Every structure is written in C-alpha cells, then in structure tokens.
Amino acid sequence: MQEQAEKETLKEEMGRIVEEARMVLPGIQALFGFQAIAVFNERFKDLPMYVQDCHVAALGFVVIAIALIMMPAAYHRLAEPGCVSRHAIKVSSRSICYALAPLAAALSLDIFVVVHAVTDAMAVSAMSGSAAFILLIALWFAYPLYSRHRQGRGATDAGA
C-alpha cells in the first residue's frame, strides 16, 4: 500500500530543516551543560580513570553533534545568503542526520558512566551503554532507512 506523499518547495524544506534543528538543539545544549558540571561533583574524581575518560569522550561527541546541528544555519547564512538551493538542502539535511551518530555515542557513553557510578559493575555498565547505542542507532538510522527502502524510495540523494 503506497502512502500519499506531497513534494515540498525548497523554501518549505529549508524551513523544516531549521525547525528540526531548533527542536533538537536545546536538548543537546542541556546535555552539554549537565556533562560540563558533572566534573565538579565530588564523586566524579572517585570514578576510575577509564570512566572519567568515557565522560570526556561523551562531552567531545556532544560538541561534534552541536556543531553539526548548527551547521545548516551557518551554511545558509554564509554560503548562500538570500536564497535556498537544492545543494543547501542536501548539506543541511545531511548535517542534521550526521549529528545523530555522535549524539548516540555521547548518550551511550553517558549511560555507561551513570550506570557505572551507580553499580560499580563494568559488565552491567558496558551492556547498558551498548544497549542504548543499539537502540538509538536502530531508531534513528536503521528503521528510517528500512522504511525508505520498503516504500520504494531507494537510495535517493534528494535529502540526506
């Protein structure tokens, strides 16, 4: 059964991309803030060095995700001011999609750190972080790509 689909104009597509970035950015910024203050917590220095390193890596991944989420606005304003092109849509759409991978890594590492702080069990922490990563990748990449393929849209390069 084929669903009805309606084409958007370039202007509508760019508006949607900017709106998606606006919706995701505050959550990522809040995560960054919580990550940044965690190192000032007394318990943080009691964590094993590899757990602290995972937290720092998660912080780095969040910075990458923020940069990618913010890129569409910067690209549009600096590279193509006053117009919207198919190329700008592709660059912006890809940037938002690519931001989800480091965000998934950051969230998974943070799950690892939190579970380790609570349980002090490496195996449980590793399984929790891995499960979170698999879930996020499945929902953010695998399922949407499977749906695109199933709907017969193939490997189109119209968006991401």
Image (tube, rainbow, N blue to C red):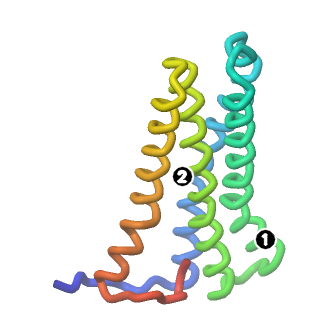
Horizontal placement of 84 versus 20: left or right?
right
Q: In the image, residue 156 lies at what x, y percent?
A: 48, 89
Residue 122, position as x, y percentages in the image: 54, 28
Residue that mark 2 sits on: 23
Q: Residue at x 59, y 35 (%)?
A: 110
Marks 2 and 1, how far apart at CA: 19 Å
Q: Amino acid at mark 1?
A: Arg
Q: Nearer the viewer, residue 120 or 39?
A: 120
Instruction: Specify the farthest residue to the right.
Output: 78
Q: Secondary structure at mark 1?
A: helix
Q: Position of residue 154 (x, y in %)?
A: 40, 88
- Give the side of residue 6 with respect to residue 71, left or right: left
Dot 2 crowding, Cα within 10 Å, few <14, some 14–19, many 20+ = few
Q: Is residue 136 above or below residue 146?
A: above
Mark positioned earlier in the residue sequence (2 or 1): 2
Q: Position of residue 23 (x, y in %)?
A: 54, 52
State the quadrant of the N terminus: bottom left
Instruction: Please count the marks in the image.
Output: 2
Q: Residue at x 65, y 29 (%)?
A: 34
Kindly identify the residue that appears in the image at 21 percent across and 85 percent down: 2
Kind of residue at badge 2: Met
Q: Quadrant of the C terminus?
A: bottom right
Residue shown at 70% from the left, 22% from the top: 48
Secondary structure at badge 2 equals helix
Of residues 37 and 136, the one drawn nearer to the viewer in this rendering:
136
Foreground label between 2 and 1: 2
Residue 124 vertical placement versus 63 (above, below): above
Q: Nearer the viewer, residue 123 or 1?
A: 123
Q: Is residue 66 above or below residue 147?
A: above
- Left-right relation of 72 to 125: right
**Tag of residue 77:** 1
